[in-house]
Image: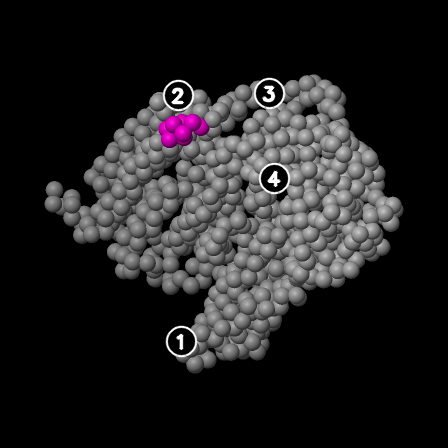
């Protein structure tokens, strides 16, 4: 078995250059897709028969919620890889993820609340998905708090990686328990957030938007990753090459 | 997690089976440190350190404060994972099987790991008992040997630094594992205590044991028995 | 100093040969875990003040609610389960800060990590001690608090059972948080920030079980879910805890 | 055009949610570039301070 690809994957200079080269290949398509989806969602898609034009919030809420989960998953997988194989680059990936994920979780909460007011008549409903999103925000904040509290960078990497892995094991349990809890207490008249019946002209902008945001995430991640790699790198020779002094 | 890492190591080892095995054959018994690099935060503490301690050998790690003596000892017992370089025990990388390596060593930091609220005897009982089922008689003998009989019932909180050291020596004399890693073994001890450290180490070497001792004092041993490693600051 | 009268090596000592010394009387994991448990219990008995603190905290918090809401038992009964569980959660959190602090400080944790025994097993023993010292007393105190909040006598077995099982899971989750925050100064708030979101399922199922017990209905379903969480915690939490402890020693 | 911005009376909820999400997206780009710039500056400082090997 040839393991060179694996070792190259763990080689910081290699990843640094790769990240630099790949960034535009994700950034521009992401911008194009998001703009297309905005036009499709705001102009081309017909109003929902129940929620009218209000349903168009979904084109922002769903991608934000999708980002919050996808970024957390990426972070946890990177953390697990970093712990198992002691791979510095994977630590750098995990460290890059947290602020992105936390900010989009915040966006998902705000848009959910903005959607909730016209639909439920209240800014905050203990809807299971919004509640889970709130807990996810706390998990992100805990992760960043832990990372910030540890002075030694290597220990910060490894400790927060354990937390990320513990968190990802818990996310489904938390979501299940919140859903279960909500089903006990929910008043029957309240409308559930999300999933209006989407016809094709409503659906395609959403899918394009999700794809666009995914590519956008990769692009932002790659930029952040370069910085995190630089912070972790010891070899002066290639840093000099990269920084160019 | 460890299982997954082992799996990977096995996979890699299968790829280049021969050299790996042959290397094992040629290794001498004992502890070997190869090209060890360690950073603490931004500080490059150990730079390509290499040293080999055979069976029956004693390594005196010397150097000023902050030169990395403690770091080296902690790396040598596998607590710190080196950024690069290897640590071999009888020719095997210790990080392949840490529990086995740990059961072959005892590490005593510059503070004896004693619970302030427990007596010297209780401390010794819990400390040694984790690794060895030890009878009351052996415990008493060890306490007596380090001169602790008179105060073995007192809570560790009331003991002087030298007395706490002596309790650690008692643990040492009970846990006859091959590899001793001692951080400042003679600090705070009176003349008799220092001679006791010397005697214990010499007995251990005579049994074929290994000692790594980090101290900026001289070790209470004949010079001829000691291999010296001088760490420099910065 | 008697340096001569010692010629006899402790009996059973193996001569140093081979890579790892194996004594005839080497301690097994179970021996080691039992000693860890015993040591923590014995230490707690020497420091009873620390032991009582979380319990007093629990009592005070549950007393605050009637004062803040109303003395009417009928109204209190409605929130009793929630009050009990939030108080129990915070009380067990309060005790967590001490879980590893002294061990890290005096080097005991290092010796655990270097004992050659699986650290996972030792951490499990430590967590078990923590549960015995906080979870069990809380479960025993819960009926008193429940009665003062207007719960009927018939609900007490359910409340005791749910608190007893739930605190197992809380101790396990908490042990991870405590291990992660080792070596951080002023870790109290951070510990809460890490532990509370993870404890949410325990809170939900525990409060539900207690609520059903107070209403006189069957509380078996949420109790089983609590037990499932505890079992999951027993299998996974010591692993994470041991990993975090090892990292803290690096 | 006015009709478009009115969004069937949902303007007060719809536009803020677009603003927040797209704002977060833009801010993340800025943050990412800034963190990279900071890391580069730190690397230069370390080189200047004579970081070794």
Q: Is residue B134 visible?
A: no
Residue at image location 58% in from the left, 36% down from the top: B64
Residue at 27% x, 38% y is D26
Q: Pointer 1 indicates a residue of which chain?
A: C
Residue bearing mark 1: C69
Marks 3/4: CA–CA distance? 40 Å
Give the CA distance from mark 2 to mark 3: 33 Å
Characterize the local packing of mark 4: few (<14), some (14-19) or many (20 or more) Cα atoms within 10 angstroms. Answer: many
> Which chain hosts label 3?
A
Q: Are marks 4 and 1 on the same chain?
A: no
How crowded pointer 2 is (Cα within 10 Å; few <14, some 14-19, many 20+) is rated as few
Residue at mark 2: A241
Q: Is residue D45 left or right of residue C128?
A: left
Reply above or below: A227 against C163: above
Residues shaded magenta? D44-51
Q: Nearer the viewer, residue C65 or C231?
A: C65
Q: Nearer the viewer, mark 2 or mark 3?
A: 2
Residue A1 numbered mark, or none:
3
Query: Are the numbered discs 1 and 2 placed on the same chain, yes or no?
Result: no
């Amino acid at each position: 078995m040839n393991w060179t690809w694996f070792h190259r994957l763990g080689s910081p200079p290699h990843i640094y250059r790769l990240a630099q080269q790949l960034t535009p290949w994700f950034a521009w398509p992401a911008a194009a897709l998001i703009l297309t989806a905005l036009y499709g969602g705001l102009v081309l898609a017909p109003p929902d028969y129940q929620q009218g034009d209000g349903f168009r919030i979904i084109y922002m809420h769903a991608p934000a919620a999708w980002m919050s989960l996808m970024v957390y998953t990426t972070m946890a997988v990177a953390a697990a890889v970093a712990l198992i194989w002691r791979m510095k680059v994977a630590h750098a990936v995990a460290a890059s993820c947290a602020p992105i994920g936390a900010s989009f979780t915040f966006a998902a909460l705000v848009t959910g609340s903005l959607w909730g007011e016209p639909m439920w008549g209240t800014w905050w409903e203990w809807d299971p998905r919004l509640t889970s999103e709130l807990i996810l925000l706390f998990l992100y904040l805990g992760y960043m708090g832990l990372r910030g509290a540890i002075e030694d960078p290597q220990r910060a990497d490894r400790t927060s990686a354990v937390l990320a892995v513990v968190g990802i094991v818990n996310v489904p349990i938390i979501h299940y328990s919140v859903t279960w809890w909500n089903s006990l207490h929910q008043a029957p008249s309240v409308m559930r957030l999300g999933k209006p019946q989407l016809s094709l002209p409503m659906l395609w902008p959403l899918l394009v938007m999700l794809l666009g945001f995914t590519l956008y995430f990769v692009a932002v991640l790659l930029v952040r990753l370069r910085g995190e790699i630089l912070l972790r790198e010891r070899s002066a020779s290639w840093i000099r090459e990269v920084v160019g002094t | 997690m460890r299982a997954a890492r082992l799996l990977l190591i096995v996979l890699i080892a299968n790829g280049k089976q021969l050299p790996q095995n042959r290397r094992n054959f040629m290794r001498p018994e004992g502890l070997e440190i190869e090209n060890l690099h360690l950073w603490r935060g931004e500080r490059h503490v150990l730079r390509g350190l290499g040293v080999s301690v055979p069976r029956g050998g004693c390594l005196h790690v010397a150097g000023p404060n902050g030169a990395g003596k403690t770091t080296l000892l902690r790396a040598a017992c596998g607590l710190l994972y080196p950024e690069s370089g290897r640590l071999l025990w009888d020719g095997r990388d210790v990080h392949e099987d840490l529990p086995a390596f740990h059961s072959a060593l005892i590490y005593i930091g510059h503070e004896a790991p004693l619970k302030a609220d427990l007596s010297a005897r209780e401390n010794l009982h819990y400390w040694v008992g984790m690794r060895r089922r030890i009878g009351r008689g052996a415990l008493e003998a060890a306490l007596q040997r380090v001169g602790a009989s008179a105060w073995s019932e007192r809570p560790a909180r009331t003991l002087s630094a030298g007395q706490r050291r002596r309790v650690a020596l008692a643990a040492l004399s009970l846990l006859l594992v091959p590899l001793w890693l001692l951080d400042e073994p003679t600090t705070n001890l009176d003349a008799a205590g220092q001679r006791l450290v010397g005697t214990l180490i010499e007995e251990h070497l005579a049994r074929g044991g290994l000692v790594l001792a980090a101290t900026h004092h001289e070790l209470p041993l004949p010079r001829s028995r000691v291999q010296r490693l001088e760490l420099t600051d910065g | 100093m008697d340096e001569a009268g010692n010629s006899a090596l402790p009996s059973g000592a193996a001569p140093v040969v081979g890579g790892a010394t194996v004594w005839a009387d080497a301690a097994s994991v179970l021996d080691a875990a039992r000693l860890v448990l015993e040591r923590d219990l014995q230490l707690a008995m020497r420091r009873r003040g620390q032991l009582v603190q979380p319990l007093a905290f629990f009592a005070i918090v549950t007393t605050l609610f009637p004062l803040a809401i109303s003395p009417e038992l009928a109204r209190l009964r409605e929130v009793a389960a929630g009050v009990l569980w939030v108080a129990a959660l915070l009380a067990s959190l309060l005790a967590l800060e001490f879980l590893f602090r002294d061990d890290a400080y005096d080097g005991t944790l290092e010796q655990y990590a270097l004992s050659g025994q699986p650290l996972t097993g030792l951490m499990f023993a430590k967590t078990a001690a923590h549960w015995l010292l906080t979870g069990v007393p809380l479960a025993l105190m819960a009926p008193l608090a429940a009665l003062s909040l207007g719960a009927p006598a018939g609900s007490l077995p359910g409340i005791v059972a749910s608190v007893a099982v739930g605190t197992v899971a809380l101790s396990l989750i908490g042990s991870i948080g405590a291990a992660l925050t080792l070596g951080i100064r002023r870790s109290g708030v951070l510990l809460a920030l890490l532990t509370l979101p993870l404890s949410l399922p325990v809170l939900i199922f525990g409060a539900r079980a207690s609520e059903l017990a107070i209403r006189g209905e069957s509380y078996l379903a949420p109790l089983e879910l609590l037990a499932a969480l505890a079992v999951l915690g027993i299998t996974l939490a010591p692993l994470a805890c041991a990993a975090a402890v090892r990292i803290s020693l690096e | 055009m006015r009709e478009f911005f009115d969004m069937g009376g949902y303007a007060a909820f719809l536009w803020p949610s677009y603003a927040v999400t797209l704002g977060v997206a833009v801010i993340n780009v800025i943050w990412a570039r800034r963190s990279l710039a900071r890391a580069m500056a730190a690397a230069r400082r370390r080189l200047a301070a004579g970081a070794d090997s």
